[in-house]
Image (cartoon, rainbow, N blue to C red):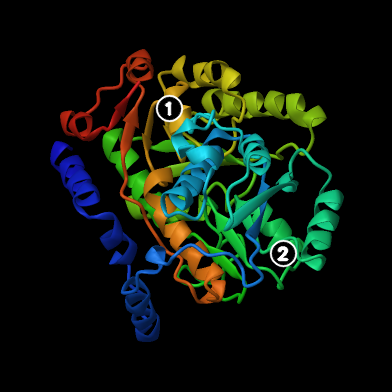
Amino acid sequence: MKKIVTIIICVLFAIPVLTIALSAKSADPEINEKVDAYFSTEVTETEPHAKEDGTPYNICYVDIDPYPPSGEMLYFLLKQLYDKGWIVLPNNMAFTDLPFDSSDLDAKEFINYLADLGTGDYISFSKDQNYYIALEDNGYVKKNIEKGIKNKDIDLILCLGTSPGTLTIGDMGIKDVPIMVYFSVDPVSAGLSYEQEYSGRDNVWCHTSSDIYKNQLSFYHDTYPFKKIGMVYYSESVGAIAMYRYGAEALGDVKIVEKKIDTYDTAEEEEEYYDNLKKVYTDLVEKDGIDAFLLNTDMIKDPDRMDEYMKIFYDKKIPVFVQNSEFSVARGATMLMSASDAVSQAPFAVDAMIRIFGGEKPGEIYQRFVPSPSISINMGSAEKIDLDINDEVLRMTERFY
């Protein structure tokens, strides 16, 4: 077991970020030629500039709801724009002086603050084009975005998550404005992008990195050889379920016990959602007999509820692995081998944004980037379930809680 785990970790950590991004080359030589040409350019060194009429590029921000991992992704993307000179704060203010914590950030509040503060001559944000679609009337959101596009008040739509991408690309069918879909688990399965490398839509760019989830499941299994792992999700694409199924099939002796539930659309439905989630979690443990659990993305949004829900599993000595979110490990989940990294992915996304501002079609911009994985462990939670973690894993772990 030690040898297997050591080999896996060495492979995962020995490969530089950019090499990982290019490691899974396409079978299509034409695509590979385009990829090589893409990475040979230095677009992120392009001088910051305004539009031809001298006004800044107006960004419409569309998110799901307050969710710390999403806020962290936004924070480091905007910090990268600041570092590249595209965001200029007043009075020589440094980005790190902003009164926000990257690890626990309300994205909408952050955008509203920047809209009031001002971000310079090249990029601007508007409080009027800043949405949490799970907490707002979607009819109003669509109408207001359409109005912004018609009045030329929107130059780019930045979507954090699959649902915002579905709303703007699928439901609204927007084609006149560039759309960037960032922090979407599997935009191909969600129908937002036709392929991993290029979206196949002229005005759409999606960050893709879904292959990491197959490797993630294998790593968790080598760390703790479970037979039945539970997963609860409201969307197969958000939960990366297709990738986990492939991973379980490759392992051969692993069964995924899946439960799909409805998420909530309004604040009034929130309590009913969490009651249902608690019942489903309890059934997995008491009726389905799982011996491991994977906390899928965007299932427990309220940090104050983590202890209550983790206790369901820990009382039965069941480890809780995490699909995404360092935040979840800090709050009590057992372990994360990260599938996304807000810091290392930011330059890649900003590079795409700058290319769009430079006139390139989003659909012709390469979009596959798999970040270097990192490991986080909550040692207190591991002790609760008597989890014996391999020495090699401990040595490779970046964060302990």
How crowded is the residue under tag 2: few (<14 C-alpha within 10 Å), some, or many (20+)?
some
Residue at the (31%, 49%) spot, across then down: 372
Q: Would residue 66 be found to the left or right of residue 143 on screen?
A: left
Give the camera-side residue of 56 and 200. 56
Which residue type carries mark 1?
Answer: Val
Residue at the (57%, 49%) spot, across then down: 238
Regarding mark 1 in the picture, which secondary structure is present there?
helix
Displayed quadrant of residue 180? bottom right
Regarding mark 2 in the picture, which secondary structure is present there?
helix
Give the camera-side residue of 96 and 159. 96
What residue sits right under mark 2 in the picture? 170
What residue sits right under mark 1 in the picture? 329
How crowded is the residue under tag 1: few (<14 C-alpha within 10 Å), some, or many (20+)?
many
Q: Would residue 111 be found to the left or right of residue 389 on screen?
A: right
Instruction: Count how many numbered circles sit on residues in the image.
Output: 2
Query: Up-down: is 83 above or below 168?
Result: above
Residue at the (40%, 19%) spot, across then down: 317
Residue 297: in sight, yes or no?
A: no
Residue 389: in sight, yes or no?
A: yes
Which comes before the other along the chain, label 1 or label 2? 2
> Which percent across, then down, holds residue 185?
52, 52
